Image (cartoon, grey):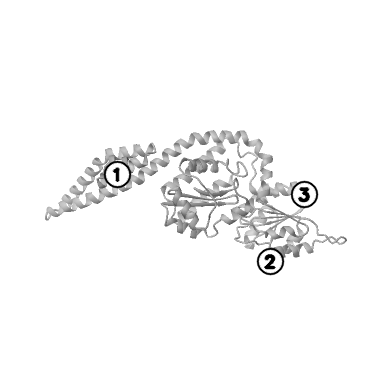
Amino acid sequence: MAGLNHHTAGLGDLETFRFSDEEGFLAAARERFKGALLLQTCNRTEVLVHGDARALTDFLHDQGRDSFEVLEDVAVLRHLLELAAGVDSMIIGEDQILGQLKGALALAQEHGTSDPVIDLCIKKAVHVGVEVRKRTEINRGAVSIGSAAVALAEDLLGTLDGRHILVIGSGEMGMLVTKALAARDLTAIYVANRTYERALVLAEKIGGKAVNFSELTRYITLSDVVITCTSAPHPLITREILARAMRDRCWPIDGHPRPLVIVDIAQPRDVEEAAAGIDGVNLYTIDDLRDVNEHTIEARRTEAARAETFIEEELDRFLSQINCASADEVLRGLYTWAEAVRVRERDRALGRLHGCGPETEGVIDDLTRVLTKKLLIDATFSIRSCAKQGQIEDAEWLVRAITRGDRLCSQRDD
């Protein structure tokens, strides 16, 4: 696994590392790895592959990415469990990561890059994430990125009572934002989206007003707070748009505009960075939400420790499952070879029995199948035992010894 996340990278680095063409990325990965999955959220871009670390490093270099962290073997499994449990999230205990992991797996399956090992990794991680939330209170009172954005705006303004709020984006994050806002005593909530119908659906749920995207400047002018969270690949709110809106917010006497708080939680960002220099604009990004998390993290440190204990217990089971899945892959090669031999010898025998009927052919076919299965029983047991103990190379050596006549002793000496 390789990539960047909020622990080691700022917003700018995360944006640079992000892959805008996910379908193209997975298509390229399909040519290099047995399986691959791309996880992209507000705070991380991470690539999981069924392959080796060196190959993944070379692949990302070929994709134009130079600086990233690489995990391999058990460290990957532990990271996946901590990620799904909410322990590794910027907002400790948040639940959105479970849906994001499922979404990444669905995308990999759609584009043919999820093999049995990748599939097992994500499903096991999600299962552990659900169990952690059942066994601990890690997500009690937890805030999402969306509700943290609302909390930040409230801290900055003292209160949101009587305020006008504009939410741009009606996806999952937009729903989280509006849900958090619905608990406040606001004068108005405006919801804007490129697709007006989607804005209308969300606005109706929270008693807000849907806004046409063409009227964005007008509603920025009317609002005290703008929270934007679209999935657009480029900034939607330019310096020019904000400059025009702020001119219409000027106080009549001193000529300075009424202050506007903008919280941009999109990845990549919805607001041009240069817009922060406009008089009256107070622009905040995901990086500024870290402080909000620090206020709540202490209350959940004990629960996070309990989650870590459970994760360590599950890690051994996870490792055993992964090793068994690897054994299935090794055994697939053995049984493919054995079936080819069986069919060849069966057909050769039937060729010598001139004019035999279907009943005889069926007996010969059944006999060869049973013999093949029985001859491979002990080898199958040995291969599975090796794999379960993490001795995958020994399992592969054994298959090569059977199928190609390789000498185990010479392989080990090398």
Vertical comparison of 78 with 201: above or below: above
Location of residue 30 (image quadrant): bottom left
Q: Mark 2 or mark 1, which has the lower sequence index? A: 2
| Residue on which the image places disc 2 | 214
Residue type, label 2: Ser
Q: CA distance from mark 2 to mark 3?
A: 28 Å
Query: Which percent across, then down, holds residue 315?
Result: 48, 37
| Residue on which the image places disc 1 | 399
Residue at 26 percent across and 47 percent down: it is 404
Q: Mark 2 or mark 3, which has the lower sequence index? A: 3
Label 2 vs label 1, nearer the camera? 1
Q: Is residue 114 left or right of residue 83?
A: left
Question: For the residue carrying disc 3, how many other residues have a C-alpha within 10 Å: few (<14), some (14-19), or many (20+)?
Answer: some
| Residue on which the image places disc 3 | 157
Q: CA distance from mark 1 to mark 3?
A: 68 Å
Spot the residue most to the right: 253
Q: State if disc 3 and disc 1 touch (CB < 8 Å).
A: no
Q: Mark 1 or mark 3, which has the lower sequence index? A: 3
